[in-house]
Image (cartoon, helix red, strand yellow):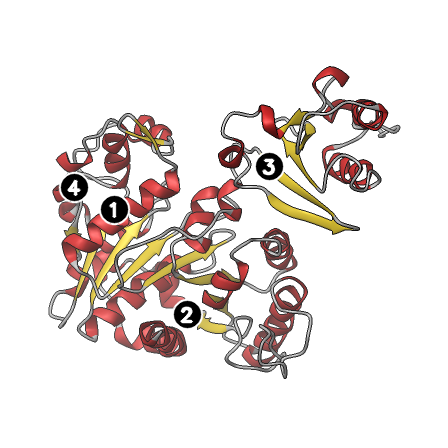
Amino acid sequence: MTNTGNILFQQALETALGITEALGTSLGDEIVLVRDLRGRIRPVLPTKQMGSVLEKYRSDLATQLGAYAFDKGRSVLFKDELTEPDVVLSERRLLKETNGLSIYLLDRQIIGQDWMRDTLQRTTTNPRVTFFGLKGGVGRSTALVNWAWHLAEQGKKVLVFDLDLESPGVSSSLLPSTYLPDYGVVDWFVEDGVGQAQIVEYELLARSPLAQGLDGEISVIPAYGTKTGDYLPKLARCYAEFSGDQPESWAERLQKFVERMEQQYTPDVVILDSRAGLHDIAAVLATRMEATTMLFAIDTPQTWKGYELLFKHWRSHPQLTTFRTNLQIIAGMVPDTGRDNYLQGFKEHAWDVFRDNLYDMTGPDDLDTFSFDLDDESAPHAPVPIFWHRALMEFDPAQGGIDRKTAEEALSLFFEQVDRLLDTTNQD
């Protein structure tokens, strides 16, 4: 059916912004537009007031926002009538500043909020690395397993969290079924929800046989364990925002969980395997955990469109200048023919989305800006390659271990460059 003038979701915010901007400062110099779970929008004004300007504002919002409006009587809120207004409005973000008026957005969402929240505070100091991809099939899990083995070969104590809970794969790659611990990530979250996570905390970790004979070790906290039982009912309760009787966001609970395990096992490196896609779990791991984040990609229009959508969202992130320095694009599944041309095209496409969304507008010669030339090999957009290898198509380290020759042929540059990133993080 053709749209015949109805306001759609993406138009509602622009319309509300335009109506509000036209007011100038006649109703105050700060106005917060609140968008609810349905997408309906109404402003919070600084103080309760009356008058013709307010009445026109109410009327314009109620009539011009269509299905995304509140009725006229409920179309405006007042800050001084809210309970704990500073808490309620604390997650607003600036939309526009014009002629002395600041207009903010407070977005009430079921998911998607964690992409824009502040970095979580932590007490541990070991480096963390997140492996993230917009979609599966880009070699993320294979790279993670091989890099964990590579670090253990160097004598490092590696702790891996399988946080891809909807599609756990790293667990089975690193732990044969006979090595699984009693419990896993979902058990910790379910028990933490009723305030008794400590009951399972010492039964979550197993040593991977992949590190046998190496100077280091690989410890794994899998998504589930041998005593987990029915997985799906636990998965459905993992993301609750309470711990015992106290309200606590999922992100804060995850930070608490990771820190407790870090304090118990004192790893040299923590690897966080993220769920793929634009989901709050990925948001926490990519932007809030103080982790170096590997962004896995293949050179397709769908990949770059996905990262463009994500980066556009990040562009207004209050902590962008903090976490963008921890991003690194990874070129997965680089074909075994025409590699130079493939990587050049990959780099150009990566540069496009970084330059237009995450880099500063001024040139790279300005030392105070975060900007890079196309061919700057130290830039986040400069691809770290993982080469396609036939042996990796049937990769099952839990059964056959790591083949050193295959790892070197496919991942030697990845090992070298990610090790360098890790060394830089340790120096910082």
Foreground residue among 134 and 282:
282
> How far apart are labels 4 and 1 at the CA level?
12 Å
Label 1: few (<14), some (14–19) or many (≥20) C-alpha neighbours in 10 Å: many
On residue 389, the disc is: 2
Secondary element under disc 1, as helix, strand or loop, is: loop
Which numbered disc, 2 or 3, marks the residue that appears first in the sequence? Answer: 3
| Mark 1 residue type | Pro
> How far apart are labels 3 and 1 at the CA level?
33 Å
Secondary element under disc 4, as helix, strand or loop, is: helix
Which numbered disc, 4 or 3, marks the residue that appears first in the sequence? Answer: 3
Residue under numbered circle 4: 201
| Mark 2 residue type | His
Residue under numbered circle 3: 107
Name the residue: 60% across, 68% down: 350
x and y percent of residue 24 in the render?
Answer: 81, 42
Q: Nearer the viewer, mark 4 or mark 1?
A: 4
Q: Are marks 3 and 1 in contact (CB under 8 Å)?
A: no
> How far apart are labels 2 and 3 at the CA level?
44 Å
